[in-house]
Amino acid sequence: MIDLLQHGSPSLIDLISDELWRQLQAIGTVERYQDGQMIHLRGDEKPGITVVLDGRVMIGLQGSEGTFLTSSVMGRGQCFGEFTLFAGLPRTHDISAIGETQVLQIKGKPFLALFNAEPSLSHALLTINVYRTHGLLEFLDDLRRLPLPVHVAKFLLSMSESASNKKEIQCNQEVLAFNFGVSRISIGKALKKLEATGLIEVGYGKIAITDHPQLRRWVEQRCPVSALRASRVNSTSQ
C-alpha cells in the first residue's frame, strides 16, 4: 500500500506510557465502524484527535473517475486530527474504515487539557509529526530532483522497509500516479523501465522487489544526494 505519511513513523501508543494511554482512553469515546463506513470527511472542522484502536483506516480522496485514491493507511495506535486542534484547519482528506474498525475519538477541549498537563504527550505528537514532515520533505525533494523511474524505485525501497512482506508492495498504477502527480502512462513507462532491469516485477495490484541490495545500489548510483535512513525512536511505554 502506498503511504506518504506512515512509513517509518512510530505510533502514538509506541511513544507514551501505559498510564498516559489509560488517561487518553478515559477522556475519549470508543466508536465502531463497518468496512467502508466514513469516519471523517474532507473539510470537517470539528476539533479532535482520533486514535485507531483496532482494524485500519484509509485516508485519501475521490479521483476524477470516481475511484478512491489512497494517500495513507493507519493501523492500531496511529492518530490523526492534529490540524483541527492546533491550527484550526479543516481536514484535508476523507477517512474511512477498512473492515471492522474501532477508534478512540477525543474531543478538543479534554485533549488539550491533558496535552498541557502532560509534556510527554506533546513530545509524542511532536515526534510523530516530525517523522511525517521529514518523510514528506524527502519525497518532495526527490520529486524535483530525480527522474521518475529513480524516484519510484527509491520510494518502493522506502515502502518495503515498513511493509509486512518486504519483497512485495501492495499498490496499483493509478494510486502511484496520483501520489507522484503524473499520468498513469508515465508511471507505466517508469515501471517498465525498472522491470527491464530485472530488479522489480509488476503484478496485478502489487510490485515485487526481486533484489533489494541491487535495487538500492541502482538508486544510489543515480541520486545526486545520498539517501537518508532514519533510525526509530525508542518507545517510552512500559
Image (cartoon, rainbow, N blue to C red):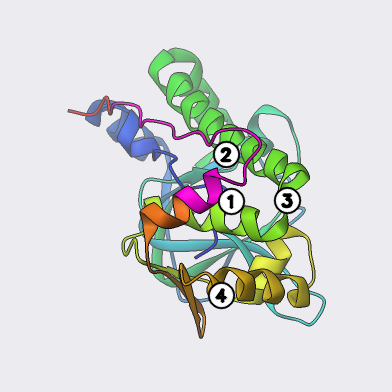
Gap in Å between the C-alphas at discs 4 and 1? 26 Å
**In x, y percent, where is residue 158?**
48, 50
Q: Residues within 10 Å of mark 1 (few under 14, many from 20)?
A: some
Q: Earlier in the sequence, mark 4 or mark 2?
A: 2
Left or right of 151 on screen, residue 75? left
Q: Which residue is pictured at 41% across the width and 56% down the height?
A: 214
Q: Which quadrant of the figure contains the C terminus?
A: top left
Which of the two discs, 3 and 1, sits closer to the camera?
Answer: 1
Task: Tell me where the magenta segment starts and ends, as one range.
Answer: 217-234
Gap in Å between the C-alphas at discs 3 and 2? 18 Å
Label 4 SS: helix
> Is residue 7 in the magenta section?
no
Label 3 SS: loop
The residue pinned by badge 2 equals: 135
**For the residues bearing labels 2 and 1, Cβ distance under 8 angstroms:** yes
The residue pinned by badge 1 equals: 4
The residue pinned by badge 3 equals: 92
Q: Residues within 10 Å of mark 3 (few under 14, many from 20)?
A: some
**For the residues bearing labels 3 and 1, Cβ distance under 8 angstroms:** no
Label 2 SS: helix
Which of the two discs, 4 and 1, sits closer to the camera?
Answer: 4
Q: Earlier in the sequence, mark 4 or mark 1?
A: 1
Task: Name the quadrant containing residue 12.
Answer: top left
Which amino acid is tagged 2? Gly
**In x, y percent, where is residue 57?**
49, 62
The residue pinned by badge 4 equals: 196
